Amino acid sequence: MRSARLHDDGLVRCPWPGEDPLYMAYHDTEWGVPDYDDRALFEKLILDGFQAGLSWITILRKRDNFRKAFDDFEPSKIVRYSDKKIAALMNDAGIVRNRAKIEGTVNSAKAYLKIMEEGRNSKEGSGFSAFLWDFVDGKPKVNNFKTTASVPAATPVSTKMSKELVARGFKFVGPTIVYAFMQATGMVNDHLVTCFCHGTCGRKPRTPRLKAK
C-alpha cells in the first residue's frame, strides 16, 4: 500500500514515477489527461500491449524508437508491412523484439482502419476515439483512491472494452492491458486524491510529445 509522496519541487505525486525525470514528466503531463485523438489512442493501445510482462518505464524509454520503427504508428502504413519489414523490426534493438506483438500490431492496425471506415460511413462520422470513449459515455470517470492498493487492475468496463476489441481483431488487449490504457488516456482518472494532478488532469490540453533522454 503506497500513498502519494511529496517531491523536492514541492509537488505531491502518485508514488509510481519515483524520482525518474522522464517518468515524472509523463505522470505530470500525459497520464490521465483525456485524449480524443484517433491515431494517438491507437499508438497508446499498441504500446500498452508491448508493455505486457514489462514495466511501463521500459516502454516509455523506448517510445521514440517505437515511433520511428513503426512509422509514427500510422495504421495505413503498418497494414502494409511485409515479412521483410517484420524481420527488420525483429532485429531492431531499440524496441521490444517480440514477433507475436509485432505481428499483432499489424492485425490491430487492420482492425483500427475498419473501425475508421465504419465511422466514415455512419451518419455520426465517428471513428476510433468515439468507439472507445463510448464505453465511458464520452467523459472521464473520476475515482478517489487514497492509496495504490485501492486501484483496480481491471474493471467490468475494461473487460467489456477488451472483449469488443478482441472481437474486432485487436491483439494484446486483455482487460488489464485495457485498463492501463484507460488510465493513461484519461478515460478514468486514477491519480490518487492527494496527487496534484487529480483535480487538474481533466482540464489539461494534450501536450507535446515527451522524448526520452
Image: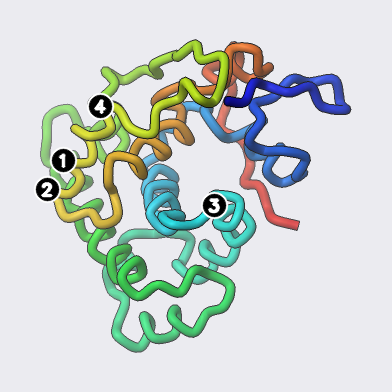
Q: Which residue is the site of mark 2?
A: 167
Determine whether the residue tagged by mark 2 lies in a helix, strand or loop: helix
Determine whether the residue tagged by mark 4 lies in a helix, strand or loop: helix
Separation of marks 4 and 1 at Cα, in angstroms: 11 Å
Residue 10 versus residue 139: which sits nearer the camera? 10
The image shows residue 84, relative to residue 49, as above or below, that is below
**For the residue carrying disc 4, how many other residues have a C-alpha within 10 Å: few (<14), some (14-19), or many (20+)?**
some
Separation of marks 3 and 4 at Cα, in angstroms: 23 Å
Q: Residue at x 49, y 69 (%)?
A: 96
Three-letter code, disc 3: Ser
Mark toward the viewer: 4 or 2: 4
Is 194 positioned to the left or the right of 153 in the image?
right
Q: Residue at x 16, y 55 (%)?
A: 169
Three-letter code, disc 4: Val
Q: Which residue is the site of mark 3?
A: 55
Q: From the top left corner, tell me how far across and down residue 162 is, in percent.
A: 23, 41
Between discs 4 and 1, the one toward the N terminus? 4
Q: Residue at x 23, y 34 (%)?
A: 159
Mark toward the viewer: 3 or 4: 3
Residue lying farthest right?
Answer: 8
Separation of marks 1 and 3 at Cα, in angstroms: 25 Å
Q: Residue at x 48, y 35 (%)?
A: 184
Q: From the top left corner, tell me how far across and down residue 194 is, in percent.
A: 65, 13
Residue 157, label in figure: 4
Residue 164, label in figure: 1
- Check if mark 1's residue and mark 3's residue have beta carbons within 8 Å: no
